[in-house]
Image (spheres, rainbow, N blue to C red):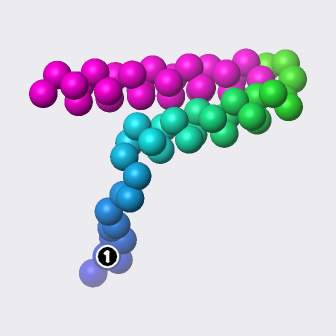
Amino acid sequence: MGSKRRRFKQVDTLEDRLSHFAEDLKTRAELARGSEREALLKKVRDAEHAVDLSRNLRLQN
């Protein structure tokens, strides 16, 4: 029999987790240079866009 999947409830909301993720990436991007910095900034934009989408979906209901 396969191993049992560990599950747990998230304490923070998705928006909070994504916001913290974006903040962490911003601080890492400040120290990075070149293509690594551009990749980190793209991830920041993607995370911020995901937060906006999540808020819009939550507010529609």
Prevailing SS of the magenta stretch: helix
Q: Can residue 36 be seen in this view?
A: no
Place residue 8 in its image quadrant.
Answer: bottom left
Q: Which of 16 and 36 is in front in this view?
A: 16
Q: In which quarter of the image is the C terminus?
A: top left
Res 28 → quadrant: top right
Q: Which residue occupies 87% across, 23% down?
A: 33
What residue range appears in magenta? 36-61
Task: Name above or below for residue 25 compared with residue 17.
Answer: above
Q: What residue type is labelled 1?
A: Lys
Read off the residue under disc 1.
Answer: 4
Q: Which residue is drawn at 27% across and 81% down?
A: 1
Q: Position of residue 42 (x, y in %)?
A: 62, 20
In the picture as drawn, the residue positioned furthest to the left comes out as 61
Q: Nearer the viewer, residue 59 or 34?
A: 59
Left or right: 54 with respect to 49? left
Magenta highlight on residue 43: yes
In this view, the residue in front, 57 or 41, is: 57
Question: What residue is rendered at 50% in x and 24% in y?
Answer: 48
